[in-house]
Amino acid sequence: MTHDERVLWCEGVEYGYPTRGESVRALSGVALSVPRGAITAVVGPSGSGKSTLLKILACLERPEDGRVWIDGTEVTGLSARTRRAMRRSRIGYVFQDPADNLLDYLTVSGHLALAARLRGRDTGADALVDVLGLAHRAGHVPRRLSGGEQQRVALAFAAVGSPSVVVADEPTAQLDRSSAARVVEALRGLADRGQAILLATHDPSVSRVADRIVELVDGRVEG
Ligand SMILES: Nc1ncnc2c1ncn2[C@@H]1O[C@H](COP(=O)(O)OP(=O)(O)OP(=O)(O)O)[C@@H](O)[C@H]1O
């Protein structure tokens, strides 16, 4: 990967969770780059640090040490307010549970309009609805949608306005096989349109379509 292709990267990331007595080391010296137009999958055993790494890269947590860059800006030292603004405009985040991603009272189109307003741009919202196979669901609220459709709405919400990166933590974990397959297709469609995607997964059907695999073991990148 050339340096021009990467939109998000980190070096020397360290993180530990304070617990009574001693801290649980979750990440040690992690370096990673995420290029545009590709799916980067973080894989590894349960507890290896995948979710922690995604939260740090998405500016939801600060690392204890190490640095993170988004579009060439080093974000670890920025104020909480600037980090929030960075997150809103440059990062789309998809949580594992569809219920955590959507608002009960908003339709699919309502979600896309809200995402465009929050991000300050609405480029491609209509095309996203098509790419993600949601056109026939535009007027529906989440409870009228299947879990897989809800995750595709969450992906659309995350991708409106083409943020620098869409980050998805185990996006298929709560889905059956065929719904998961549609979500995987949707992720591929977004990447093929140039979107950078970073995800964590246990699901081989997801890691199979990834362009790059990063394996974490005990908080370190393998290999
Ligand atoms: N809030 C917390 N307090 C204390 N320890 C935590 C906390 N969250 C995570 N950890 C620990 O940090 C390590 C990394 O956890 P993390 O959730 O990042 O792993 P993961 O690879 O995403 O796991 P999974 O695949 O099970 O979701 C684990 O040892 C975990 O027990």
Image: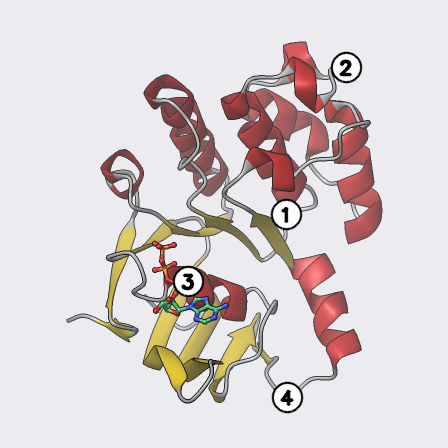
Assign a secondary structure to mark 4. loop
Q: Residue at x 62, y 30 (%)?
A: 153
Estimate the spatial distance between the alpha carbons at disc 1 and disc 2, rounded to whole Å. Answer: 23 Å
Estimate the spatial distance between the alpha carbons at disc 4 and disc 3, rounded to whole Å. Answer: 20 Å
Task: Tell me, yes or no, whether the two marked residues, 3 and 1, touch with CB atoms within 8 Å.
Answer: no
Tag 3: residue type?
A: Val
Estimate the spatial distance between the alpha carbons at disc 3 and disc 1, rounded to whole Å. Answer: 15 Å
Q: Please state, as top left, top right, bottom left or bottom right, where the C terminus lies in the image.
A: bottom left
- Residue 214: mark in rendering: none
Indicate whether 70 appears above or below 64: above
Q: Where is residue 1 drawn, in percent x and y? A: 32, 66
Assign a secondary structure to mark 3. strand
Determine if the C-beta at disc 2 is less than 8 A from ligand 1: no
Task: Of the two numbered discs 1 and 4 on the same chain, state the one appearing first in sequence.
Answer: 4
Task: Of the two numbered discs 4 and 3 on the same chain, state the one appearing first in sequence.
Answer: 3
Local crowd at mark 1 within 10 Å, few (<14), some, or many (≥20)? many
Q: Residue at x 56, y 22 (%)?
A: 149
Q: Where is residue 215 drawn, in percent x and y? A: 24, 62
